[in-house]
Amino acid sequence: MIQLDFYGTLVAASLVLLLGRGLVTRVGFLRSYNIPEPVAGGLVVALLLLILRTFDIEVRFDTSLQTPLMLAFFATIGLSADLASLKKGGRIVGVFLLAVIGLLVVQNAMGIGLATLLGLDPLMGLLTGSITLAGGHGTGAAWGTVFSEKYGLASASELALASATFGLVLGGLIGGPVARLLIKRVQVPGCSPQQVPRLPRGFEQPNKERSITPFSFVETLALIAVSLLAGNLLNGLLHGTVFELPTFVCVLFVGVVLRNGLSALGLYQVFEREVSVLGNVSLSLFLAIALMSLKLWDLAALALPIFIILAVQALVMALFAIFITFRVMGGNYDAAVLAAGHCGFGLGATPTAIANMQAVTQRYGPSQIAFLVVPMVGAFFIDIINVIVIKLYLTLPFFAAV
């Protein structure tokens, strides 16, 4: 076994990003279907490690940097959230939220229905529904423990983590192709002579050059650090109460308060361009570490019936994004970018959603609405609503009999 320490893992993650950039630049298929660079590089490395494992060679990474990077990314999302802009997008946020709720209901119905048809415990269907797909690894691990201890479901935690891993991979792979299909039907911004070009903001075009200075860098870094510290303290205060939320939601909330509070008091204006630079660095490294650390043999170990359920769930996500999300969000370019984002956090996580949308907007142009709506719904609302939906499903008669 080869164990890479903190520095080795950081070097490996950086190389994964460079590999991903090279692949997307040179492989027309990856570029045409808007596959995010961290996903392309990370999956290639994960496949290589899977091959090495067949020769009894296993490489392990120090993933201690993964959580801080994820939290730093969500802090920058919060620091980029202008409440005045959110007010303008209130109706759009509400409509998208309804689409998200619809998907949660459909995912659980599909999971339970398929599990029943395949002769499995309905709890397995629920575990391969919104718990692990929309909820991700954290939610999956939490509910896996509940299902093991309260309902006696064997290997629930292992099944949850494997299902969440499957969702993370597919969420990063189907978002780009879905957007490509939808964009063929719409007018892309900038193609019409009547439209005035708009400079991209925030996370819309991560490769856009942005001027920074050492002092402004330290200012923004301080804001991110305060968001991380205060967010973790807030999470500790809420732990065990009815208001308990995931740590990243608390960090994002503190970022929102900092950005809008300092602005309202006239003390400081957040430098959005620098926030987006640091946010994109955190996002890219987080995804690189997450994907190159994937244990693909856990997916290979999934029983065939569970694999069938997850494959159908991925197909359902793509169809839902095309026929529901795209249409209810207006059937335009912004709706196509939103559909790509929905695939990201509907199967994986909010960082995957952002990476999907960046891959699209980097090629076709900015979408301010998508980058306003998806981070807030994907980070703030989905975890709370998902818990409510899961608990409502657990009240169904056949679960009560378990």
Image (tube, rainbow, N blue to C red):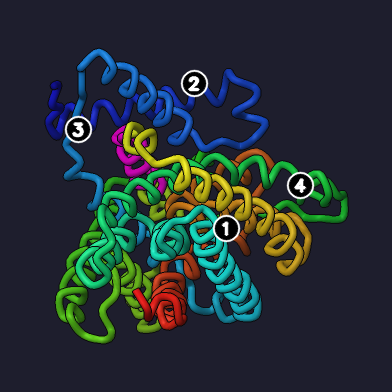
Label for residue 22?
2
Out of 397 and 56, give the one closest to the viewer: 397
User: How far apart, in angstroms, are the residues tagged by discs 4 and 2?
Assistant: 25 Å
**Which image quadrant: the C terminus?**
bottom left
Mark 4 residue element: helix
Q: Position of residue 127 (x, y in %)?
A: 39, 60
Residues shaded magenta = 280-295
User: How far apart, in angstroms, are the residues tagged by discs 4 and 1?
Assistant: 15 Å
Q: Earlier in the sequence, mark 4 or mark 1?
A: 4
Q: Position of residue 400 (x, y in %)?
A: 37, 81
Q: Amino acid at mark 2?
A: Gly
Magenta span: helix, strand or loop, mainly? helix
Q: Which residue in the structure is indicated by mark 1? A: 342
Residue at 48% across / 26% down in the picture?
Answer: 21
Out of 12 and 126, give the one closest to the viewer: 126
Q: Earlier in the sequence, mark 1 or mark 3?
A: 3
Mark 3 residue element: loop
In the image, residue 226 above or below residue 398: above
Q: Earlier in the sequence, mark 2 or mark 3?
A: 2
